[in-house]
Image: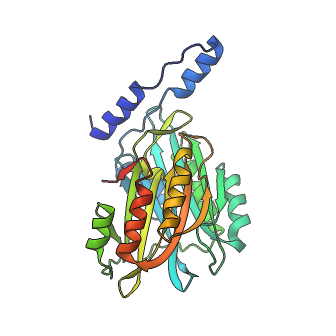
Amino acid sequence: MSPSRRRLLAAAAVAPVLVGAAPGAAAAEAARRQRVLPVPTAEADWRTVSDVLGRRGAMVDGAVYRVRFARQDLPVTTYGVTLFLGSYAAFTRYEDGHTVLMGSLAVTEAELQHATDALQAGGLELTAIHKHLLAHEPAMWWVHFHGHAEDPLALAHGVKAALAVTATPSVPPVASQPRVDLDTAAIEGALNTSGVNDSGIHRFTFNRRETVSDHGRVLLPGTGMTTLISFYPVGAGRAAVNGDFAMTADEVQNVLAALRRGGIDVVELHNHGLTEEPRLFFAHFWAIEDGATLARALRAALDATNTVPAV
């Protein structure tokens, strides 16, 4: 049995026992709390999904098939920094044979209504619509979505239909790994973990320590239940940082206060899902400063959350 699966089974074993509830309510609550675990899969298991979407994804957490859709057609400028955004779709198969889809589309304001219509027509649920950046051009929106079906191809076709009403390129960009023009050692030292070079952007991911579930189904970090921090080099050792902190309600105020003490702008506070447990809130942020200085400020905010570096 894999270590990740043992952790999930252990989490299920310590689910709280209900005391003093009415029999009917107790049965309903017990059913809600009974956790359904993901099953390990390999990239080959998702070949038909890949065929529908027209590109390959990557396995995350041993069970999540995550497909990225870069918007290389759409450079977005915010406070003088040019970013290239993207969408994603994450598929997870469960032990009862069902597949859950979670993801997010990055769309222009002109594409927004068409994309939401297409997602709903494809049987997918909208779980959040909001922004991730302060003033920027062109105006962008992020649409988070969720789906659940026995047939993963039905979910994949829903994503494909939504992408088709946007200008998202049908062919992924040519992979490149330019050197990150930052003092990555100082940044990693401040954050006390290693980052990854993602096309010249230095990224860090932190997972929630507790088990997150939705209608009893355990959600692995790769579905989007993470804190993500991205350092974009802007020259002279300075970086633009953005991303989002995944927080429980009792962590929100301390995280926001730590960000502001560190001179980091708060962009948005919102949910990405509708029914996950524990309830998660996401704080998006932005700043431009010396990379190591920003990392120290972000470390203080991380210390206010129940997270660990992703491995």
Q: Quadrant of residue 164?
A: bottom right
Q: Is residue 152 above or below residue 301?
A: above
Q: Where's residue 254, x and y in %?
A: 51, 53
Q: In terms of depth relative to the viewer, which is nearer, 217 or 273?
A: 273
Horizontal and vertical percent for residue 253? 56, 53
Taking the image as shown, residue 216 lies to the left or right of residue 6, namely right
Residue placed at 50% from the left, 26% from the top?
34
Q: Position of residue 33 (x, y in %)?
A: 52, 27
Question: Does residue 181 sit above or below 2 in this rendering?
Answer: below
Q: Residue at x 48, y 73 (%)?
A: 171
> Depth check: 106 or 29 in front?
29
The residue positioned farthest toward the front in the image shown: 261
- In the visual, does 289 lie left or right of 214? left
Seen from the viewer's position, the closer of residues 233 and 44 is 233
Name the colour scheme: rainbow
Asked if 243 appears above or below 173 in the picture, the reply is above
- In the displayed structure image, the side of residue 50 where residue 215 appears, left or right: right
Figure check: 82 above or below 123? below
218 or 163, nearer to the observer: 218
Q: On the picture, is 269 further left or further right than 227? A: right
Image quadrant holding the N terminus, namely top left
